[in-house]
Image: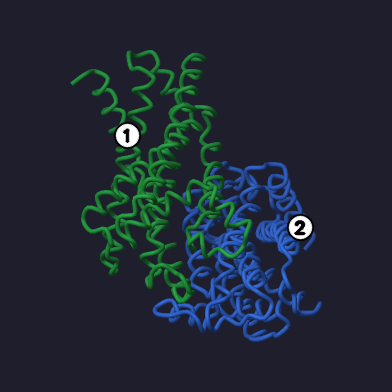
Chain colours: A green, B blue
Amino acid sequence: MSPSLVQAATLGRRAIVRTARQPANVIFPLIFPMLLLAVNAGGLRSATRLPGFPTDSFLAFALAVPFVQGALLATINANVEFARDIQTGFLNRLALTPVRGIVLLVGQLGGLITIAVVQGVFYLVVALAFGVRLASGVGGAVMLLLLEVAIALGFAALGSWAALRTGSTEAVQGLFPVFFVFLFLSSMNMPRNLIQTDWFRWVATINPVSYLIEAVRSLVIEGWNGEALGLGFAAAGGLSLFGFALATHALWRRLERT
Amino acid sequence: MNDTVAVARGVSWRMLHTFFTNPAFLLPSLAFPLFFFTAFAGGLSRVSQIPGFDFPTGYTAFQFVFVLLQSAAFAGVFTGFGIARDFESGFMRRLMLAAPNRSGILLGYSFSALVRWLTVASVVTAVALLARMKIGGGGVDLFALYTLALLLNLAGTLWATGVAMRLRTQQAAPVMQMPVFLLLFFAPVYVPLDLLQGWIHGVASVNPITPLLEAGRGFISGAPELALASFAIAAGLIAGFCFWAVRGLRSAEAAG
């Protein structure tokens, strides 16, 4: 195995172990999205009686939200730890070793994605236990986890950029409400064609998070919808590329300063 | 009495100074209720077309009441975070040594939570009016609505204070936040109680926040209902959490 791969694996493992050692960082991203799903699925069940609503199970409809929200929470937690590495000087010490900057970033993102996949499996198992059946079958479950990886990578890259750019745990935590704006102003609770308020529908349409949610949702309630999946992967890929470019640049600047 | 007021004034001034001068505290307090209001009133307005949904002043007013009560309770919870922070930084220990009457500490935190909420409520109300929220209730109804929210703010503050005084760490934040979140969201948030189905209807029916929410919606629509019951519940919550907070203060004193 090449030294770069070993280094990336070691740093990724470190990111996972560090998260696993903090129960709040493990339990909160698992439980909170499930609680919100329970609340929304119960409270908005009667919304399925609206003409044109795509399914008669709001639980199945809303299942997409925990996948995006969980990726977001995991990203915030992991990148807070990354920022702490910068604050405590770990990154500076690492810069004195032969580890390449890009390997550091890949290791950090790899660890985070592993956490997101574990979360995705948890959400899927809970949903199946409560009677949700994937319209896309077993293959859809695999595709759903791939999508979760892509979503987590997008958020993680942006979070890593914030951590590297600011080097402040508080600043990364401050991203939490910013990301949540995007989640709230999306089609998370209502299909876009049923959103009545014009400006909200417009915002939801230009919001990439809507496409992430709709791609996951299509696998749950529709089956294989190439357009929804294509848009979802494109949105996740775009966020990842954009975030990774910013993070790489910020890393280069930070290592240059140190 | 003068000692109590002096301590309360000092504590509340410090809390409010931190709140208004530090965007990291001010912005989330303002942002979260606005997110909820925007997402619910804007994104879910179609819900008002569900057969059986007959709230007279529209979905924006229906959601405004929830957001107002939620902001009131959470202003209290956020104050609890500040108390926990004061314990971790060692400020509380110095405050307890210096305060001639420690009840003033509780009073000061409660007053600062009230001012915090009034600030948030002003912004949320302004945004709701800009969004052309319809109001059916008169001046007395609206006064009752804001008074109800104020009482919930006090109850939330006393709850979070009791937790912060006992656990004395910022890691207690989920303990303060999660029960309040669950109580609020296991009420009829999106549709009236009659339209809830399944397990959540059962939970909402016994949730003490449900009468507060229904009374608040009655006030804003000009058709008050459950007014006495809601104020009695709010008074009961305050009495219970006051006892909880005072016992927490004694626990913190005993811990040194």
Which of discs 1 and 2 lies nearer the camera? The answer is: 1
* Chain assignment, label 1: A
* Amino acid identity at mark 2: Asp
Q: Residues within 10 Å of mark 2 (few under 14, many from 20)?
A: some
**What residue appears at the point 32 percent right and 50 percent down from the top-left corner?**
A119
**Residue drawn at the location 54% of the way across and 44% of the way down:** B88
Q: Is residue B185 above or below residue B232?
A: above
Quarter that holds the N terminus of chain A: top left
Q: What's the amino acid at mark 1?
A: Gly
Q: For the residue carrying disc 1, how many other residues have a C-alpha within 10 Å: few (<14), some (14-19), or many (20+)?
A: many
Q: Position of residue B256 (x, y in %)?
A: 53, 50
Residue A83 at least partly seen: no
The numbered disc on residue B3 is 2
Is A101 situated left or right of B78 in this image?
left
Give the residue at mark 1: A110
Residue B129 image offset from top left, x and y in percent: 75, 64
Give residue B9's position: percent from left, percent from top.
76, 54
Mark 1–mark 2 contact, CB under 8 Å? no
Percent coordinates x, y for residue A107 in the rendering: 33, 29
Quarter holding residue B46 = bottom right
What element does badge 1 sit on?
helix
